[in-house]
């Protein structure tokens, strides 16, 4: 099992979600975040005072998947999120030691499969 964390442009979120749903990856947590990577620092002026924007708004997706879905998930995100410009984002893959579905106490890959009670 792996935890995939993807940082993407906010305007690419709908494309990424569509791509993930198309490959049957439906469980995810989405967060609004700000960060700085390879983008240039932006300078603007507000009421005559200089403003420096060092951090750029991004979307973070946390997706827990079983081993067979790792490459499928990464490929879907990359294809949907890529613009070819600096600031497209990053994907981090970390091992998951344990997963527990609270309602049923199912563990690990059983806890990662779609929940039949959801429908």
Image (cartoon, rainbow, N blue to C red):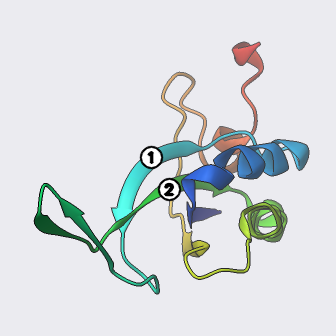
In the rendered image, which quarter is residue 6 located in? bottom right
Question: Along the horizontal axis of the image, is 33 left or right of 13?
Answer: left
**2 and 1 marks in contact (CB < 8 Å):** yes
Q: Callout 1: few (<14), some (14-19), or many (20+) C-alpha neighbours within 10 Å?
A: few
Q: Is residue 41 above or below residue 62?
A: below
In 3D space, how far apart are the residues under numbered discs 2 and 1 (Cα atoms)? 5 Å
Residue 113 shows which numbered tag? none
Q: Residue at x 60, y 64 (%)?
A: 4
Pick whichever, 90 or 67, lies toward us: 90
Rendering coords of residue 115 (x, y %): 72, 26
| Residue identified by numbered label 2 | 60
Q: Which residue in the rendered view is the most extreme toward the right?
A: 22
Q: Residue at x 32, y 69 (%)?
A: 55
Q: Is residue 32 above or below residue 105?
A: below
Pick whichever, 8 or 75, lies toward us: 8
Q: Residue at x 74, y 71 (%)?
A: 82
Question: Along the horizontal axis of the image, is 11 left or right of 31?
Answer: right
Q: Which residue in the rendered view is the most extreme toward the left?
A: 49
Residue 31 shows which numbered tag? 1
């Amino acid at each position: 099992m792996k935890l995939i964390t993807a940082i993407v442009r906010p305007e690419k979120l709908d494309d990424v979600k569509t791509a993930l749903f198309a490959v049957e990856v439906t469980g995810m947590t989405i967060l609004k975040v700000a960060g700085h990577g390879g983008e240039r620092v932006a300078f603007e002026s507000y009421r005559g005072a200089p403003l420096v924007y060092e951090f750029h708004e991004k979307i973070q997706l946390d997706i827990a998947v079983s081993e067979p879905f790792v490459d499928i998930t990464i490929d879907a995100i990359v294809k949907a999120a890529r613009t070819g410009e600096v600031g497209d984002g990053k994907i981090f893959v970390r091992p998951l030691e344990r997963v527990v579905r609270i309602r049923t106490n199912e563990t690990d890959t059983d806890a990662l499969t779609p929940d039949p009670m959801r429908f």
